[in-house]
Image (tube, rainbow, N blue to C red):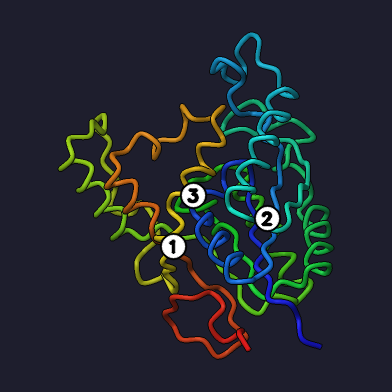
């Protein structure tokens, strides 16, 4: 039986959907592909009202989660995503935080338990294409929840056997180099930060680069919807030209391919369309 063309994207927190996959989610929705966003945690370890940080007096995790999920729904509306699925796990916080040890933190949930729940969603939606982070949590990020999202998605893909194509988000090193050169030329104060040579995804591992130029403004609107975390979103403070360059293409490393698709793609649904 023919399956409805479906893209499933698995992210760790509210706001993660915007930067690396907001464009493909918007583009494929406009092309008539059913789009499903799975968000694993409620984002409790984000900033609270007034920029109060986790661990500081007055930080209310439940209030943060409520606001961040509301912001997520607004972002989903800007991107036109068809289905939002919340796994509802507790945000583990950044690597090394005390919150990493909370028994209910997503990073501490047995992989097979969370993967089974994700697998149920794969059984329901039967996506041909699935996207999540690489084993480092995306470009070496290393956030415990990103790494856990990677683990449960790999497990669910393997257990169900449903996806025909499986991708990791990628940040090509060549693109990072171009972006930082543009920012320096624009006079942006980088605070002495210089990306190391091994920052990002090796260019030879990038199999797909999707042009999402027409969706840059929608990505920006989606990102700005997460206003409670705006202080932490560096890309919103970049010059317009650098911002556009960073947002206009999304790159991926392909880990599974059951169809006739070339080594380098411009469309994640190559080989799957009628």
- Asked whether, in this view, residue 30 is left or right of residue 177, the answer is right
Q: Which mark identifies residue 219?
A: 3
Q: Which mark identifies residue 37?
A: 2
Q: Residue at x 20, y 48 (%)?
A: 181
Are circles 2 and 1 on residues that touch, CB within 8 Å? no
Q: Which residue is mark 1?
A: 212
Q: Residue at x 45, y 60 (%)?
A: 170
Going from N to C along the chain, the mark reached first, 2 or 1, is 2
Graded by Cα atoms within 10 Å as few (under 14), some (14 to 19) or many (20 or more), the crowding at tag 3 reads many
Q: Is residue 104 above or below residue 149?
A: above
Measure the alpha-carbon separation of dots 3 and 2. Answer: 15 Å
Graded by Cα atoms within 10 Å as few (under 14), some (14 to 19) or many (20 or more), the crowding at tag 1 reads many
Are circles 1 and 3 on residues that touch, CB within 8 Å? yes
Secondary element under disc 1, as helix, strand or loop, is loop
Q: Quadrant of residue 50?
A: top right
Graded by Cα atoms within 10 Å as few (under 14), some (14 to 19) or many (20 or more), the crowding at tag 2 reads many
Going from N to C along the chain, the mark reached first, 1 or 3, is 1
Measured as percent of width and height from the top left, residue 270 is found at 53, 82
Going from N to C along the chain, the mark reached first, 3 or 2, is 2
């Amino acid at each position: 039986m023919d399956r409805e063309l479906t893209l499933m994207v698995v992210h760790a927190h509210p706001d993660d959907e915007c930067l690396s996959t907001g464009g493909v989610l918007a583009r494929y929705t406009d092309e008539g592909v059913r789009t499903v966003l799975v968000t694993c945690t409620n984002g409790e370890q984000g900033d609270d009202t007034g920029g109060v940080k986790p661990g500081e007096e007055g930080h209310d995790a439940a209030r943060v989660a409520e606001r961040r999920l509301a912001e997520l729904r607004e972002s989903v509306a800007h991107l036109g995503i068809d289905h939002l699925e919340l796994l509802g796990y507790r945000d583990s916080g950044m690597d090394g935080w005390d919150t990493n040890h909370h028994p209910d933190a997503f990073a501490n949930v047995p992989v097979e338990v969370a993967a089974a729940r994700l697998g149920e969603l794969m059984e329901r939606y039967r996506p041909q294409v699935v996207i999540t982070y690489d084993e480092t949590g995306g470009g070496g990020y290393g956030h415990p929840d990103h790494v856990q999202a990677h683990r449960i998605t790999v497990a669910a893909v393997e257990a169900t056997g449903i996806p025909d194509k499986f991708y990791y988000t990628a940040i090509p090193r060549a693109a990072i180099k171009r972006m930082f050169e543009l920012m320096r030329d624009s006079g942006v104060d980088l605070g002495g930060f210089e990306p190391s040579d091994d920052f990002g995804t090796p260019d030879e591992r990038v199999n797909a680069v999707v042009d999402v130029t027409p969706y840059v403004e929608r990505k920006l609107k989606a990102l700005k919807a997460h206003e409670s975390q705006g202080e932490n979103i560096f890309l919103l403070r970049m010059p317009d030209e650098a911002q556009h360059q960073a947002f206009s293409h999304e790159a991926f490393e392909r880990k599974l391919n059951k169809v006739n698709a070339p080594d380098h793609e411009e469309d994640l649904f190559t080989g799957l369309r009628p």
